[in-house]
């Protein structure tokens, strides 16, 4: 009997189901007690298992010939996409056949399909996408990195709660620190949503280590464990950081290649430089986690390879084991209770 | 007779006027025909020139004992800051005694003082702060990096016009390409302001190479020469990039130090690694340029040293020579003319 089951959309990424199956092979070695439901075109999938008989025992292929394309609008997928591999992969959660779903498909469609089938957790308006971010002190959680382009104060507060629960579950921290991303640390800085969220988080009675505002450079510094922002800013910050890391690595390569001494030094230090390369490998932290739903969905980067997709599977498995959802639900209810007297008081004063 | 005059706030930075005077010495060597007006506390400034008699000939000290502090609110400075060195440095532009002003002081106060005294260019609602950003292909202009936390579509369009004129002047490009920073390249992505701005820029008849939406990783890639965004997102992207570059450099140092071969290799390749260090030196691109005013104001980073402040002076001098303002004014008027028939038509249809 399997410890847990992961449902996988085989048709989601840019590079086709071959990458997904190769990733399953990697992940199955690391997690021998996990079982996989694989949704996709059986005709394409079967041959990929021809030489993987061990893996085949752990994977159940479920024929799902249609696929969501990258250019499909979320609304189209909700109307006409119920036979797609993405739809079925999420449906497996709703039917309790799997504990976590992974797809490398169209992010907007995956979010729409997940919200439609799984619904949000009690008290959570909108789910967020969380990312694990390498920092000087280890890893931090950053959310939202792309689900909600506009957010009000209460949504940012919800993201703080979800991110904090996630950090406890995945990073194993007892009391993760939380900060709101802003353009300055002073109270007067920023727009209404961040100021309002800071106000709520400071005054609520949640047992949360809220540290106020943090700035862009605090993310890599690891100043706080959880960085909360709207999906527009978070997505741009994440991609800007990826682009910068790639640029610096490129500058390093170019500088070392330009001279003979540079090449000799690089050869001698190649072990150290390979350590650096592994550390900067964007595939190692591949996977955005959808938080705030009645079910765990992990989005892999669309253009990743089998190493990256396997990282997304690993993250999904960690999530399923850590019971993040129960932690989020508890905190959200505690906030309701904590703010209820204030709301009642407001009502009384208004009457 | 001096070719041009730069007014300098000596009391602005975190590290005091010593850094500013040392920076003047560097810049004066590079720009022998430039003259400086230096505003600050004469008692502190005079001794700094004791051993710099050559420099003293090019610098006119103007006693200005009060200083704007980092924690002062812009509104306070407008009410009570008229005797500060910052106020006087900007006033020199308004009185046409200098062609460009440089300060390392409080950004919000400097923007307020500049707007109050210089006023915005005809047709420009709000000024923006532009930054030069190192990319794989050279340098790009990114704006706004902090003046306006919320922007509507028309403001983003104004930023595109200002940034394009700036890129022509400073980067020497004949037809700089322009992109709007967004969370995806597709038309449907993003919030109303970016979608609206894209619509205006696509349909207006400005001779601008508008390339639509770009994403966070496109900045370092150099996909376009001018990246346009609101001041909230731009500030966070800039600081996130700075933090990431610092993080990667730290990872490199740590990786090389960890083993003997790493250290030997680093020693042999030290020339190449120093090239990299210079390339990543944040002081080399120090200086945010206030665009959209009747005068050029350059903001140096508050915590910089004399090398960084000298970079800001260099940028200011380049700006003054390039006559950026005239270019912005011309384009803004062209846009008014191009959109005038459409507005008239809208009026007629509404009537």
Image (cartoon, coloured by chain):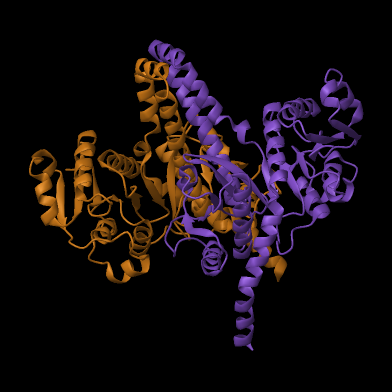
Chain colours: A orange, B purple
* Quadrant into which the N terminus of chain A falls: top left
The residue at 91%/42% (across/down) is B83
Residue A348 location, quadrant = bottom right
Q: Nearer the viewer, residue A197 or B155?
A: B155
Residue B31 vertical placement versus A45 (above, below): above
Residue B228 location, quadrant = bottom right
* x and y percentages locating residue B76 in the rendered image: 84, 48
Q: Nearer the viewer, residue A1 or B151?
A: B151
Q: Which residue is farthest front?
A: B1
Residue A101 seen anywhere in this rendered image of the structure: yes
Q: For this view, does A335 lie left or right of residue B261?
A: right
The residue at 72%/66% (across/down) is A349
* x and y percentages locating residue B78 in the rendered image: 84, 50
Residue A166 vertical placement versus B338 (above, below): above
Residue B26 vertical placement versus B125 (above, below): above
Q: Nearer the viewer, residue B331 or B307?
A: B331
Q: For this view, does B10 lie left or right of residue A126?
A: right
Residue A57 seen anywhere in this rendered image of the structure: no
Q: Which residue is farthest bottom?
A: B351
Q: For this view, does B274 lie left or right of residue A11?
A: right
The residue at 46%/39% (across/down) is B136
The residue at 82%/25% (across/down) is B55
* Quadrant into which the C terminus of chain A falls: bottom right
* x and y percentages locating residue B346 in the rendered image: 60, 81
Q: Nearer the viewer, residue A347 or B187?
A: B187
Q: For this view, does B41 lie left or right of residue B314?
A: right
């Amino acid at each position: 009997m399997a410890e847990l089951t992961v449902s996988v959309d085989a048709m989601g990424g840019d590079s086709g189901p071959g990458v997904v199956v190769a990733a399953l092979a990697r992940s199955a070695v690391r997690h021998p007690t996990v079982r996989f439901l694989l949704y996709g075109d059986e005709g394409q999938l079967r041959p990929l298992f021809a030489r993987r008989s061990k893996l085949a025992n752990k994977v159940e292929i479920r024929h799902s010939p249609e696929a969501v394309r990258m250019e499909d609008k979320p609304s189209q997928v909700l109307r006409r996409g119920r036979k797609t591999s993405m739809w079925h992969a999420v449906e497996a959660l709703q039917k309790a056949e799997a504990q976590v779903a992974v797809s490398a498909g169209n992010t907007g469609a995956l979010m729409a399909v997940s919200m439609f089938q799984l619904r949000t957790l009690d008290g959570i308006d909108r789910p967020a996408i969380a990312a694990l971010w390498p920092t000087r002190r280890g890893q931090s959680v950053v959310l939202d990195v792309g689900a909600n382009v506009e957010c009000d104060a209460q949504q940012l507060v919800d993201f703080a709660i979800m991110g904090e629960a996630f950090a406890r579950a995945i990073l194993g921290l007892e009391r993760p620190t939380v900060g709101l991303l802003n353009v300055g640390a002073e109270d007067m800085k920023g727009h209404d949503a961040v100021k309002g969220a800071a106000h709520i988080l400071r005054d609520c009675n949640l047992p949360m280590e809220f540290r106020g505002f943090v700035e862009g450079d605090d993310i890599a510094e690891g100043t706080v464990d959880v960085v909360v922002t709207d999906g527009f800013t978070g997505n741009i910050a994440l991609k800007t950081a990826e682009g910068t890391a790639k640029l610096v690595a490129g500058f390093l390569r170019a500088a070392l290649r330009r001279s003979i001494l540079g090449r000799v030094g690089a050869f001698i230090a190649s072990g150290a430089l390979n350590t650096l390369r592994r550390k900067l490998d964007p595939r190692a932290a591949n996977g955005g986690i959808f938080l705030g739903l009645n079910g765990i969905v992990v989005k892999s980067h669309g253009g990743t390879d089998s190493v990256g997709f396997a990282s997304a599977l690993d993250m999904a498995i960690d999530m399923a084991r850590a019971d993040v959802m129960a932690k989020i639900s508890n905190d959200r209810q505690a906030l309701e209770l904590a703010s209820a007297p204030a709301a009642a008081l407001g009502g009384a004063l208004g009457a």
